Image (cartoon, coloured by chain):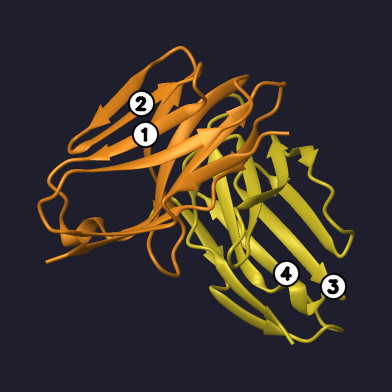
């Protein structure tokens, strides 16, 4: 059974700092990896999707990497802004016909002005 | 807001009530999903529909009954719920179940008294 761990559970940084969020998984038979952000009381917004054949994806100030051999993914946020404050979730889709998605518990990020 | 809408946004119900959650997607997608998000726990996949057929049922109690009348609409019928069923219920859709980004609705905050 796939287990997904996100460390740290919470993070507080000053505005402008570069930061890295970590996500580890136990089953390397993944189909794809997705990073989401969730604002309080809201649904999830997809940030980046990495297929299992890819190593990284970039969108603006965000860069996500995938290392299947070590069972890790990282989300790098450059020049953080207060608007980046949210909970960040990683999710893995497993191989097996239909999409079986396992989410991590999230990292709650606060960027202080 | 994404192209996925959910109603109601908030629902309070007693254990003997029957209610339904509604999800509608305006993205032309063929797959739809129900997730449960409880406090301090990872997001849990409940049901997956592909082209109106249920393709995944993650051992969800029978007091939750999904319905997908067409590819744009998804319902979750609730009856005889328990207080521990209180959670944020999220709907999502994707082009297909295999590899695609999931787009989430804002969720329904359910409280069972």
According to the image, label 1 marks what residue? A74
For marks 3 and 4, give the one nearer the viewer: 3
Q: Position of residue B54 (x, y in %)?
A: 78, 39
Q: Colour of chain B?
A: yellow
Q: Give me the chain letter of mark 2.
A: A
| Residue placed under numbered mark 3 in the picture | B79
The chain containing the residue under callout 4 comes to B
Asked if labels 3 and 4 share a chain, the reply is yes
Q: Chain of mark 1?
A: A
- Mark in front: 1 vs 3: 1
User: Which quadrant, please, contains the N terminus of chain A?
Assistant: top right
Query: Residues at marks 2 and 1, common chain?
Result: yes
Q: CA distance from mark 2 to mark 4?
A: 39 Å
Mark 3 vs mark 4, CA separation in Å: 9 Å
Per the image, the residue denoted by label 4 is B20
Question: In this orientation, does residue A70 appear?
Answer: yes
Residue depicted at x 46% and y 29%: A72
Q: Is residue A59 left or right of residue A8?
A: left
Q: Are marks 2 and 1 in contact (CB under 8 Å)?
A: yes
Residue count near mark 4 (Cα–Cα under 10 Å), binned few <14, some 14–19, many ≥20: some
Distance, label 1 to label 4, CA atoms, is: 38 Å
Nearer to the camera, B40 or B67: B40
Q: Which lettered chain is shown in orange? A: A
Q: Earlier in the sequence, mark 3 or mark 4?
A: 4
**Observer able to see residue B26:** no
Residues packed near mark 3 inside 10 Å, few (<14), some (14 to 19) or many (20 plus):
some
- The single residue placed furthest to the top in the displayed view is A53
**Residue A71: percent from the left, percent from the top?**
52, 25
Q: Which residue is mark 2?
A: A65
């Amino acid at each position: 059974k796939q287990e997904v761990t996100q460390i740290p559970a919470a993070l507080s940084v000053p505005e402008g700092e570069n930061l890295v969020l970590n996500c580890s998984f136990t089953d390397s038979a993944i189909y794809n990896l997705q990073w989401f952000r969730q604002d309080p009381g809201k649904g999830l917004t997809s940030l980046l999707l990495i297929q299992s054949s890819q190593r990284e994806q970039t969108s603006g100030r965000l860069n996500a990497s995938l290392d299947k051999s070590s069972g890790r993914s990282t989300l790098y946020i450059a020049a953080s802004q207060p608007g980046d404050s949210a909970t960040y979730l990683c999710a893995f889709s497993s191989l097996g016909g239909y999409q079986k998605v396992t989410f991590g518990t999230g990292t709650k990020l606060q960027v202080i002005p | 807001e994404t192209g996925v809408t959910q109603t109601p946004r908030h629902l309070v119900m007693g254990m003997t009530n029957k209610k339904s959650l509604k999800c509608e997607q305006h993205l032309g997608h063929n797959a739809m999903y129900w997730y449960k998000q409880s406090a301090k726990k990872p997001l849990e996949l409940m049901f997956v529909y592909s082209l109106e057929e249920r393709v995944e049922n993650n051992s969800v109690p029978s007091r939750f009954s999904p319905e997908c009348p067409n590819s744009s609409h998804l319902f979750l019928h609730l009856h005889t719920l328990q207080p521990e069923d209180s959670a944020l219920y999220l709907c999502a859709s994707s082009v297909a179940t295999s590899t695609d980004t999931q787009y989430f609705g804002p969720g329904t905050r359910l409280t069972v008294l």
